[in-house]
Amino acid sequence: MPNQSYYAVGLTGGIGCGKSAVAAVLSAAGATVVDADMLAHRVTAAGGEAIEPIRSRFGTGFIAASGALDRAAMRRHVFADPAGRQALESIVHPLVRQAAEEEALASQRAGAPYVVFAIPLLVESGEWTQRVDRVLVVDAPQALQVQRVMQRSGLSAAEVLAIIGQQASRAARLVAANDVLVNAGPLTQLAPRAARLHGQYLRLAKGHAAATAGAL
């Protein structure tokens, strides 16, 4: 179990599965959601902590005129070069973890009942599964993932499938899960089930807080 004083839920799922929708329900109910993608964008924005290490490792061709990471160029590069992907992750991931921990501690001080770490690569990283008390996986059939991502992004089916191929398999995510929300229908069906999980997490967080207080 993690050593932190706050109760932490790791939220993950493949692209197009509906992680953001579930995160929104939990946030509206009172949980603090720490979004790893948003933090990654922050550290790779112009002036972000990752920019100079990225420039040093990959060259100026991967830095846009704005001073931010050229995400399209980097995406093409890391899809073709696994070593490049590992190098990028070795720069960005520690910065994201540090920022996520700072946000979680701030939310605890503000009285949030529990923290949700929304981590698309939670299973792939390995480390995040050791940093949370519970893993929530949002799941969907692959054909539906492809359809959703194509509709919202304009990517081709082949491009979406390439992204899915870079992520952990559905089977691997489900093995890591404590809770699974299958998002194969409209959001009106998903929200009540996410709200029920919120109630469960509140109870678990209270028990965690009592146990932590008793250990002091």
Image (tube, helix red, strand yellow):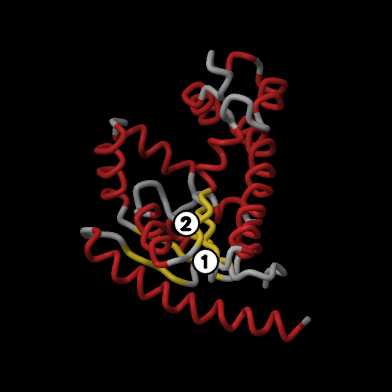
56 or 20, nearer to the observer = 20
> How far apart, in angstroms, are the residues tagged by discs 2 and 1?
8 Å
Q: Residue furthest front?
A: 110
* Residue 208 at least partly seen: yes
* Residue labelled with disc 2: 12
Measured as percent of width and height from the top left, residue 73 is found at 50, 21
Q: Which mark is residue 216?
A: none
Where is residue 77 shown, x and y percent of the image?
54, 24
When the figure is inspected, residue 89 is found, relative to residue 201, above or below; the finding is above
Q: Is residue 175 left or right of residue 100?
A: left
Name the residue rendered at 35%, 71% in the picture: 195
Up/down of 169 relative to 207, above or below: above
Name the residue rendered at 42%, 77% in the picture: 199
Looking at this view, is 19 or 129 the one in front?
19
- Where is residue 106 drawn, in percent x and y? 63, 58
2 or 1: tag closer to the N-terminus:
2
Which residue is label 1 attached to? 135
- State if disc 1 and disc 2 touch (CB < 8 Å): yes
Q: Amino acid at mark 2?
A: Thr
| Quarter of the image with the C terminus in it | bottom right
- Quarter of the view holding residue 46: top right
**Left or right relative to 35: residue 148:** left
Residue type (three-letter) at the residue carrying disc 1: Val
For mark 1, give the secondary structure: strand
Query: Which quadrant does the N terminus fall into?
Result: bottom right
Q: Residue at coordinates 57% horizontally, 68% vertically from top-left?
A: 111
Image quadrant in which you'd find residue 28:
bottom left
How busy is the neighbourhood of tag 2: few (under 14 within 10 Å), some, or many (20 plus)? many
Q: Nearer the viewer, residue 17 or 28?
A: 28
Please give the name of the residue rendered at 56% of the width and 39% of the height, measured from the top-left corner. Answer: 40
